[in-house]
Amino acid sequence: NAGVMQNPRHLVRRRGQEARLRCSPVKGHSHVYWYRQLPEEGLKFMVYLQKENIIDESGMPKERFSAEFPKEGPSILRIQQVVRGDSAAYFCASSGTGFRGGYTFGSGTRLTVV
Amino acid sequence: GENVEQHPSTLSVQEGDSAVIKCTYSDSASNYFPWYKQELGKRPQLIIDIRSNVGEKKDQRIAVTLNKTAKHFSLHITETQPEDSAVYFCAAEEEGGSEKLVFGKGTKLTVNP
């Protein structure tokens, strides 16, 4: 039973390019959460999605960032026109019915903007 | 919204000693408090959690205590080992039932052999 899978593990983008981060939840899980971790910082909530719905995007910047969790396929976090300040580790977590037992995080995508 | 403060930011102990990390939170509606361990370059891993209906929970060498009145909770690691060296994060659920966690800034624990 594979855990939360994220890819790519490392992503390098030049300023102005688009970054697409993928998250495949644990099989059968329908809740996905994205968090961002800046160097030497704790994790910050970005967005919570259920299949085909955004439940809470209060932590996601209004511009350049978007997220989706389609009926089929992984959840995607998209960052358009990346800037140096977007460099961070992006972690995804999933749960089946809310975190009654806590999140299980994926291994993360480390985005570097050059 | 919820605010979580974590202390200390760094902690160095000798192998075999105990380590204590403390967190305070601001939202009295929070009722779920997990602790995560993150090794360098790895994912945060849930090591223990506590809900507001209990005051203490223990799992082998790790324990967590919760004081809802004072709005603080603590992680206790006994008989520390070098492999306990990592960054530890506390978190609190924002607005009870939101499924959104607010994390502290982390404590870098070093266990010296």
Image: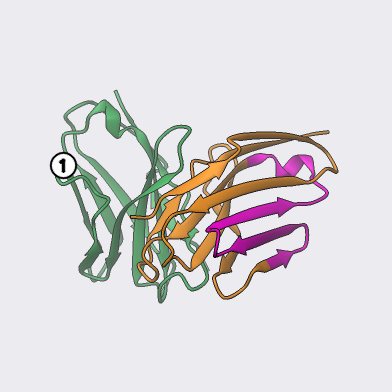
Q: Is residue B22 left or right of residue A43?
A: right
Q: Is residue B85 magenta?
A: yes
Q: Where residue A10 sits: x, y (%)?
A: 40, 37
Q: Chain of mark 1?
A: A
Q: Is residue B84 magenta?
A: yes
Chain depicted in orange = B
Q: Nearer the viewer, residue B72 or A34?
A: B72
Chain depicted in green = A
Q: Where residue B55 sits: x, y (%)?
A: 64, 69
Q: Residue at x 48, y 73 (%)?
A: A100
Q: Is residue A96 left or right of residue B69?
A: left
> Height in image: A84 above or below B102?
above
Q: Which residue is mark 1?
A: A64
Give the quarter of the image for residue B34.
Answer: bottom right
Q: Give the magenta range.
A: B57-86
Q: Residue at x 67, y 67 (%)?
A: B56
Q: Where residue B15 sits: x, y (%)?
A: 83, 39
